[in-house]
Amino acid sequence: MKLRITDPTAILVDADVASVRAEDASGSFGILSGHADFLTALGVSIVSWRGADGAPGYCAVRNGILTVSHGTEVAVATREGHVGDDLGTLEHDVLARYRERDEGERSERTASAKLRMQAIRHMVEALQGGGRELGL
């Protein structure tokens, strides 16, 4: 079978595989060659596979669509994916990326709140001054 996992910016996995496992809202499922055509939505999940050589692979996905076509093509389109060969390492990498993103978003929210407060202060000062600063 052919497995292709993509996010909006890249092809994360493009490999020949013997089997694929994933999880959707109904639970965990497996895909082998000859599987019926299939479409499902993925939430936050681990897509795992065994390569044609038997080596395992893993991709942590955040929301996406998994399709099986012609019994030999498995495609996953995800908002965000992180690939790894070891689940422990993948978990560590994903958590580190989420922490970085959370810290960045927190900084952006703080900067945005400061700008809003400055704008409010300037508007209050202008209104208290009778609108002279606004040209009224």
Image (cartoon, rainbow, N blue to C red):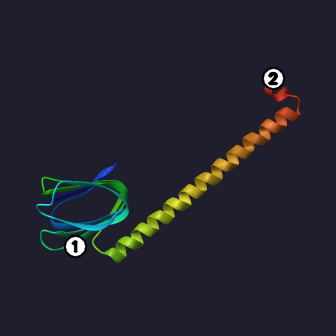
Identify residue type, mark 1.
Pro
**Place of residue 104 in the rendered image (x, y in percent of width and height, measured from the top left):** 54, 57
Number of other residues with Cα within 10 Å of mark 1, as a class: few under 14, some 14 to 19, many 20 or more: some
Which residue position holds label 1?
56
The amino acid at mark 2 is Gly
Q: Quadrant of residue 46?
A: bottom left
How many C-alpha atoms fall within 10 Å of the one at disc 2: few (<14), some, or many (≥20)?
Answer: few
Q: Along the line of sight, which residue is nearer the eye, 43 or 121?
A: 43
Look at mark 2 in the image and give the residue it sits on. 135
| Residue shown at 12% from the left, 72% from the top | 53
Q: Is residue 57 above or below residue 15?
A: below
- Residue located at (35% from left, 71% from top): 90
Q: Earlier in the sequence, mark 1 or mark 2?
A: 1
Q: Measured from the top left, where is residue 51 in percent x and y?
A: 16, 68
* Residue 21 visible in the shown view: yes
Q: Secondary structure at mark 2?
A: loop
Residue 67 visible, this angle: no
In the rendered image, the residue lying farthest to the bottom is 88
Outermost residue on the front side: it is 26
Q: Height in image: 59 above or below 129? A: below
Please give left or right for residue 1 compared with residue 67 in the image. Answer: left
Residue 65 percent across, percent down from the top left? 31, 53
